Image (cartoon, rainbow, N blue to C red):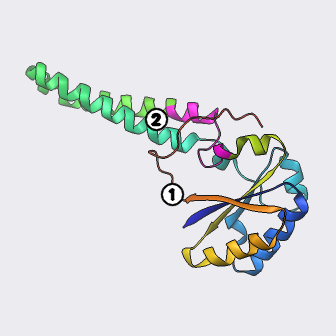
Amino acid sequence: MRQLHILTNNIKTVNQLTQQLYKSGVKENNIHVVHKDHSLIQFHGLNDSSFWQELDIIHCGQRGLLIGLLVGLTAGNGLLLFFPEASEHLALIIFVIGLLTAFSTWVGGMIGAAHDNYRIAPYHHHLKKGSFLLLVDIEPNQLVTVKQIVQQQHNAQYVGSTSTISNPFNGGELVRHDF
């Protein structure tokens, strides 16, 4: 699946777009709206984005897991390489590797909790100014139809897409979540 990103400046366009997307076969739970005023989104009966979609907790947690695993395995291998007698305590070494991995995953998640999700970070300045970002999860065969619907709306702009699967190797800078 792909996640399409659509920007608009008013709630009327968001309502029109979501209704047209529903009619075209996009499921209701596959459309979420990111905006700085969550109560406005809920008042209009739209699917508000969750904190999992707004914050980078999972993405940074995955990065932390990879870093912790790499550091833990490197330290464990180094210990066994330079101190062969440490192999008698293999269970302890495996436990420490697991502990390092868990800790770094937690630290990564905490870092991500303070930053925008890497998928919405490029639109941070638009969101801060009050724009609406629609996150539309679609099947590949729906792409052309959804793009046509967006083109028909004068106040909406298709601005990009990402995979719906979180990739710890994607995403560059961390943008502070403050909108």
Residue identifier under label 2: 105
How many C-alpha atoms fall within 10 Å of the one at disc 1: few (<14), some, or many (≥20)? few
The residue tagged with tag 1: helix, strand or loop? Answer: loop
The quarter holding residue 3 reads bottom right
117 falls in the magenta region: yes
Closer to us: 23 or 4:
4
Left or right of residue 46: residue 30 = left
Q: Is residue 139 visible?
A: yes
Q: Residue furthest left?
A: 84
Closer to us: 157 or 110:
157
The residue tagged with tag 2: helix, strand or loop? Answer: helix
Query: Residue at horizontal 91%, vertical 56%?
Result: 43
Residue type at numbered disc 1: Ile
Q: CA distance from mark 1 to mark 2?
A: 18 Å
Left or right of residue 88: residue 55 = right
Q: Is residue 88 visible?
A: no
Magenta segment: 108-122
Query: Residue at horizontal 69%, vertical 73%?
Result: 146
125 is higher (above) or lower (below) than 13: above
Residue type at numbered disc 2: Thr
Residue 69, how many percent across, how many down? 34, 35
Q: Quadrant of the C terminus?
A: top right
Residue identifier under label 1: 165
